[in-house]
């Protein structure tokens, strides 16, 4: 599936909502990110717009809107971090993501529902008509978005209004531009490699030094993925370069737990990392809606190598680890 759009949703649920086969990624109320499906997998998230798009949702806005589960600050930020990482992975430039009046690549569900990626004249042809008439008029669906937009865009049937605004007190219609601004900021690359300036520790497995760890965000050490494979009898499977890059690992002993993760450090291309990703003879993934194929951790590409947060790797695969801050400055792993 080639990805042309990213849709930003709220799930109209409590903060801990999880459902596979719908959104590719759900950000929970505490900001933790659940990757439920690889971004190259088809899932159902945005009415009649799923064949070329990714859906990322904040689990929020269930119950009485704005009162019971309003979007949290960390949740919105981490949704934007995730969208920024994906946009970067796709090779999009921050300046290529347009704002209202005509949005192109990153849309809130409110904007998608209102066909704000089409011209206003076309959008009028999708308003106040049946879905089939809208489709006959060349639109993906009828206008089921917010009832009025401050710039006079035709109002819809209000079935969806995800992120029409971020806070109840914000101006109506301002949500998309505010989220895109945040996403663009998260896409900016650092000018130099962070490895040389990061605090470095030794990674020890049963006393043997197997790798170096680099403290790249507040409290997480990143390790070169390749260094972690042989010590845990993991084989390197398919490595797909390019815009939808991923790495598949192979192990007949380890099974990931698919826990929620924190966002990766920003500004670097991301790499989805799978374990035993099923593929057919041509190397294509063989997941379906009921069994989506999901990466178990994410990594970032720094100086042409993939680095992963060590804690994510260990937690997912049941490897215990202890950070030892004595004069050896090491992290000790044990199987
Ligand atoms: Zn939605």
Image: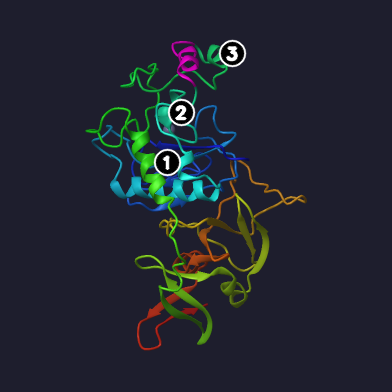
Whether residue 299 can be seen here: yes
Image quarter for ligand 1: top left
Q: Is residue 229 magenta?
A: no
Which residue was labeled with disc 1? 57
Whether residue 79 can be seen here: no
Say which of 76 and 232 sits in front.
Answer: 76
Q: Earlier in the sequence, mark 1 or mark 3?
A: 1
Say which of 152 and 324 sits in front.
Answer: 152
Colour mode of the rendering? rainbow
Locate residue 286 relative to residue 101 in the image: left or right: right
Is the residue under label 3 in contact with that under label 2 (CB below 8 Å)? Answer: no
Which residue was labeled with disc 2? 112
Q: Is mark 1 within 8 Å of ligand 1?
A: yes
Of helix, strand and loop, which one carries label 1?
strand
Of helix, strand and loop, which one carries label 3?
helix
Q: Is residue 123 magenta?
A: yes
Q: Is mark 2 within 8 Å of ligand 1?
A: no
Point out residue 97 in the picture as x, y percentages from the top left corner.
46, 38
Q: Earlier in the sequence, mark 2 or mark 1?
A: 1
Point out residue 238 in the picture as x, y percentages from the top left corner.
68, 59
Q: Which residues are magenta?
A: 119-129
Q: Residue at x 48, y 69 (%)?
A: 314
Q: CA distance from mark 1 to mark 3?
A: 30 Å
Residue 189 in the image: above or below residue 226: above
Which residue was labeled with disc 3? 136
Neighbourhood count class around disc 1 (C-alpha, 10 Å): few under 14, some 14–19, many 20 upward: many
Residue 142 in the image: above or below residue 23: above
Q: CA distance from mark 2 to mark 1?
A: 14 Å
Q: Earlier in the sequence, mark 2 or mark 3?
A: 2
């Amino acid at each position: 599936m080639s990805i042309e759009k990213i849709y930003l949703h709220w799930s109209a649920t409590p903060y801990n909502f999880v459902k596979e086969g719908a959104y590719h990624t759900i950000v929970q109320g505490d900001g933790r990110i659940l990757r439920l499906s690889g971004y190259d997998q088809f899932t159902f998230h945005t009415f009649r717009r799923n064949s070329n798009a990714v859906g990322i949702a904040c689990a929020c806005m269930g119950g009485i809107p704005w009162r019971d589960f309003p979007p949290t600050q960390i949740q919105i930020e981490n949704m934007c971090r995730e969208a920024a990482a994906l946009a970067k992975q796709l090779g999009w430039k921050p300046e290529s993501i347009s704002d209202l009046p005509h949005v192109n690549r990153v849309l809130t569900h409110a904007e998608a529902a209102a066909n704000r990626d089409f011209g206003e004249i076309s959008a009028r042809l999708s308003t106040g008509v049946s879905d089939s008439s809208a489709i006959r008029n060349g639109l993906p669906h009828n206008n089921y978005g917010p009832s009025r937009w401050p710039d006079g865009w035709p109002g819809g049937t209000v079935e969806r209004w995800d992120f029409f605004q971020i806070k109840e007190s914000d101006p109506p219609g301002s949500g998309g531009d505010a989220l895109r601004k945040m996403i663009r900021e998260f896409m900016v690359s650092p000018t130099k490699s962070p490895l040389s300036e990061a605090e470095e520790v030794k990674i020890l497995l049963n006393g043997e030094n197997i790798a170096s760890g680099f403290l790249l965000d507040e409290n997480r050490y990143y390790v070169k993925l390749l260094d972690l494979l042989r010590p845990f009898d993991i084989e390197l499977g398919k490595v797909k370069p390019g815009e939808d890059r991923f790495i598949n690992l192979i192990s007949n002993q380890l099974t990931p737990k698919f826990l929620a993760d924190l966002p990766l450090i920003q500004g670097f291309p991301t790499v989805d990392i799978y374990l035993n990703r099923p593929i057919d003879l041509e190397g294509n993934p063989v997941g379906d809606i009921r069994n989506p194929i999901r990466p178990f951790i994410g990594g970032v590409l720094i100086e042409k190598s993939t680095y992963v947060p060590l804690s994510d790797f260990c937690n997912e695969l049941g490897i215990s680890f202890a950070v030892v801050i004595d004069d050896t400055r090491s992290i000790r792993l044990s199987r």
